[in-house]
Image (cartoon, grey):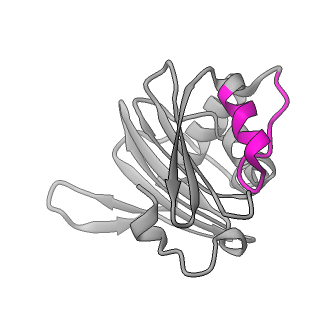
Amino acid sequence: MTVSVGCYGARGMTVTMVKLARALVATSIVLSSCLGAGRDAQATLGGDLASVAANQQHLGGARQIQKLASGERHELQLPSGIVVHEYLSPAGAVYAITWRGPTMPDLRELLGPYFAQLARRDSYPHDGHHRMTMTGSDLEIRASGHRRSFAGRAWVPSLVPPGVNLDATLD
């Protein structure tokens, strides 16, 4: 598993710091553990349409569906202000998710069985603006965030439909 992090200082210089990646992971794990306590995690990433409906129910969000050439995009607007997009392939598998909002979403819920790869990372709290890139076993995560502004995307490369340009499809 590879994790790289870039931090932009006052002078715009990029500095690679593992502590920043660990801070994002720590925040994700703590928030996900708190938000997911007492619930069964649904296998959203890598799951099917039923897992999207279960996420809507568990997370308490309103859902809108948009047809795409590469399947469907299900948008969940959560009461917390977080917007989650879940991308289903024409075969019905959730191949990617994106999120943005004032806090981190419940990644245990959204990543399902893939959450274990994120949870394995050592973590130490650290304040500041940061971004994270993680490459795991058939899992990619790109996330950034600072106070009241978090965004990210995760996808399973083996589930991405042929010919899908992730940069053009994921928002």
Find the residue positioned furthest to the bottom: 163
Q: Which residues are magenta?
A: 39-56
Number of numbered tags placed on the structure image: 0
Residue name at image x 56 percent, y 34 percent: 105
- In the rendering, at what x and y percent does residue 100 appear? 43, 40
- In the rendering, at what x and y percent does residue 167 appear? 42, 69
Q: Can I make out residue 19 in this image?
A: no
Q: Can I make out residue 162 in this image?
A: yes
Name the foreground residue: 133 vs 164: 164
Q: Give the quadrant of the C terminus.
A: bottom left
Name the foreground residue: 159 vs 72: 72
Name the foreground residue: 148 vs 20: 148
Name the foreground residue: 46 vs 151: 46
Query: In the rendered image, which quarter is residue 136 located in?
Result: bottom right
Position above or below: 88 against 148: below
Left or right, residue 15 beside residue 124: left
Left or right, residue 83 beside residue 136: left
- In the rendering, at what x and y percent does residue 72 appear? 58, 53
